[in-house]
Amino acid sequence: MLKHLEQQLAERESQSLRRRRRVAETACAPRQTVTAHDGTPRELLTFCSNDYLGLANHPALIEALAEGARLYGAGSGASHLICGHSRAHALLEDDLAEMMSPHLPEVRALYFCTGYLANLAVLTALGDAQTTIYTDLLNHASLIDGARLAKAAVHTYPHNDLTGLARRLAACSTPRKLIVTDGVFSMDGDLARLPELLALAEQHDAYILVDDAHGFGVLGEQGRGVLSHFGLRSERLICMGTLGKAAGVGGAFVAAHRTFIDWLVQSARAYIYTTAAPPAVAHAVRASLRLIRGDEGDQRRQHLHALITALRAGVPEVLGEVLNQRGWRLAESHTAIQPLIVGGSAEALAIAAGLETQGLWVPAIRPPTVPSGSARLRITLSAAHRLDDVERLLAGLAAAARGAGDAEGTT
């Protein structure tokens, strides 16, 4: 087996697909000291975190986490259904349910350690043999894996292709149907066509699981997410949101009609059989929700939007010839996720390496995370960035593109 795995690793290396970790020496922030593969620490201006509101290192959340540890200790001690369900968890679930109540009738919320567990829980608990699951081609890996583990029949529809989905729903013969989609697609930054999806769900008696990992905290009134962005309200909606991205802390939640939540507590193995998250984390998330919903949250979202506008205006200016000559393109996204699609994996790695020599950290995303031929730089913006950070990134992209072009011309 070891020899086989060594061969597989060598093959990935030859295809520019091998993954490597970095070690972050300092807190999540736009300027972060990172130890590279050669063991050398270096401060980099980062455009790669999902800390969209810049809350991960917020003093109020640091203090809330410490306060939570003083109140509840370091760990939960058990699963939620044994003795691990803390008052901190219960209060957080109440806060989340209240936050989502404009969009989900008779709503309750359930807190999970991670978004991955939350998606596995929902799909395996609801996806029985009498259910058909319809999942968007570009959904999160956790949605894909949850659908694979479910006992339901699973159909994948082309990205945001609702005509094809409508045909499949009309032909479905199972008693129950579940449409599964990201709210904001994590590698492209575009939005699901949720109003039209909800109309299809109502027409064909289906329900919708919306993974709002990259919209919660950022989109909609008071950061309520993609459901608020579109002004939707329906008991057919089940919302999963993560709390380690825009919320800056950790964990995830599922919010839905109370009957769905009751069923998850009874049957979702990914909830029942895992140790509850530390109560201190839940306590800190409550502090984060107060910031997200308040004036500071509004100000951070406004600043983030200004940064997005500046980046989208600047990329064509600094990369105009490159975009035309080499087929690069900035994805159609108006969210904090701004992918620059370059095509080949080796080319994406070369551009990322060129940026790093300038002190900029922008990750190259390659297959199988994205489709073959669509390797990209996944640029993510945070409200903790400044406008001059974006200007520095634009200058770095221009220089890296020139360097890659010069290298290509010598080969």
Image (cartoon, rainbow, N blue to C red):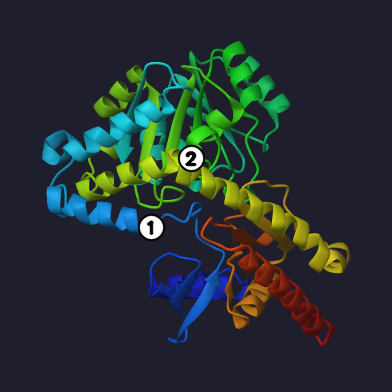
Residue for point 26% across, 56% down: 63
User: Does residue 151 appear to the left or right of 167 in the view shown?
Assistant: left
**Residue 302: which disc?**
none
Q: Are marks 2 and 1 in contact (CB under 8 Å)?
A: no
Quadrant of the snapshot with the C terminus: bottom right
Observer-nearest of 238 and 206: 238
Observer-nearest of 324 and 311: 311
Residue for point 62% across, 60% down: 379
Type of amino acid under label 1 = His
Residue for point 45% across, 87% down: 40
Q: Is residue 180 visible?
A: no
Quadrant of the snapshot with the N terminus: bottom left
Can you give x and y, in whole percent of width and height, for residue 388 in the image?
A: 64, 68
Can you give x and y, in whole percent of width and height, for residue 215 in the image?
A: 53, 41
Instruction: Please say if 291 is above or below 132.
Output: below
The quarter of the picture where residue 202 lies is top right
Type of amino acid under label 2 = Phe
**Residue 216: which disc?**
2
Q: Which of disc 1 and disc 2 is earlier in sequence? A: 1
- SS class of the residue under badge 2? loop
Residue for point 32% across, 53% down: 61
- SS class of the residue under badge 1? loop
Can you give x and y, in whole percent of width and height, for residue 303 in the image?
A: 59, 52
The quarter of the picture where residue 321 lies is bottom right
User: Does residue 327 appear to the left or right of 1 in the view shown?
Assistant: right
The span from disc 2 to disc 1 (Cα, nearest Å) is: 18 Å
Can you give x and y, in whole percent of width and height, for residue 72 in the image?
A: 14, 48
Numbered circles on residues, count? 2
Residue assigned mark 1: 58
